[in-house]
Amino acid sequence: MMNIINGGEHADNNVDIQEFMIQPVGAPTLKEAVRMGSEVFHHLAKVLKSKGMNTAVGDEGGYAPNLGSNAEALAVIAEAVKAAGYELGKDITLAMDCAASEFYKDGKYVLAGEGNKAFTSEEFTHFLEELTKQYPIVSIEDGLDESDWEGFAYQTKVLGDKIQLVGDDLFVTNTKILKEGIEKGIANSILIKFNQIGSLTETLAAIKMAKDAGYTAVISHRSGETEDATIADLAVGTAAGQIKTGSMSRSDRVAKYNQLIRIEEALGEQAPFNGRKEIKGQA
């Protein structure tokens, strides 16, 4: 997952949703996936410039323009995918990290980018559902506040059969919380941050628990990063299948992609790039 537009707490703009990502699922290899993502990223800069928008980057290396709405982020990405010569939905799919806890106020989801419109859990779920009907969004992270378990149960019921619903703030790489989520049918995927839980042993336990329950596991960087590329090795070593590690700019993000390419070159056919097959609900 390549984060190419930053919003929320990761950028100084008016976009509520924290991350808009592309997934080069149509690539035959990881190396080609990185190339495809890079091409879309650089075409996005041209699209934004043509509209008079800012191309400064946010914390995770994605562009951070002011936009008319959250949906406009998806629209400009779709334009960039087409300009790069790829087909949206076939070659490239989309993902979002809502980080909804950041705009959850007094029991409502308040979107500044939508004119301070306030949504209930059910209303925000259907807001996201409408976006998935307009664009090939196949993964949504933290689509509600971490404490809104009743809302998450509803969101999973509405979207869980066709969309990967990733818990980050929801599960915090914690097996105790994940176990409860599995038992209650909350989400269908977990974001894995191995320095969040505190040890590699606990991280591996969380990945195993998720896989045993039919959940996917997405290995992730942090918003504050270094050039250390250990998570690339972790993603391959655990056969997690998915990694979220920022955009195609900033050395702290690109270092992980470079390491993944080196691993692929070393392992060859032992490490196939599975693309869409690794995403919950897309196999």
Image (tube, rainbow, N blue to C red):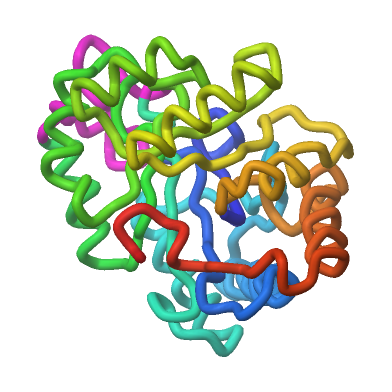
| Residue 150 located left or right of residue 236 | left
Residue at image location 71% in from the left, 66% down from the top: 270
**In the depicted view, which residue is nearer to us: 247 or 239?**
239
- Quadrant of residue 268 in the image? bottom right
**In the depicted view, which residue is nearer to us: 34 or 75?**
34
The answer to whether residue 14 shows anywhere in this view is: no
Image coords of residue 219 (percent x, y): 60, 39
**In the depicted view, which residue is nearer to us: 149 or 266?**
266
Image coords of residue 127 (percent x, y): 19, 46
If the image is split into quadrants, where does the C terminus sit?
bottom left
| Residue 33 located left or right of residue 181 | right
Residue at image location 55% in from the left, 28% down from the top: 9
Residue at image location 77% in from the left, 44% down from the top: 233
Image coords of residue 130 (percent x, y): 18, 56
- Quadrant of residue 145 in the image? top left
Residue 66 covered by magenta stretch: no
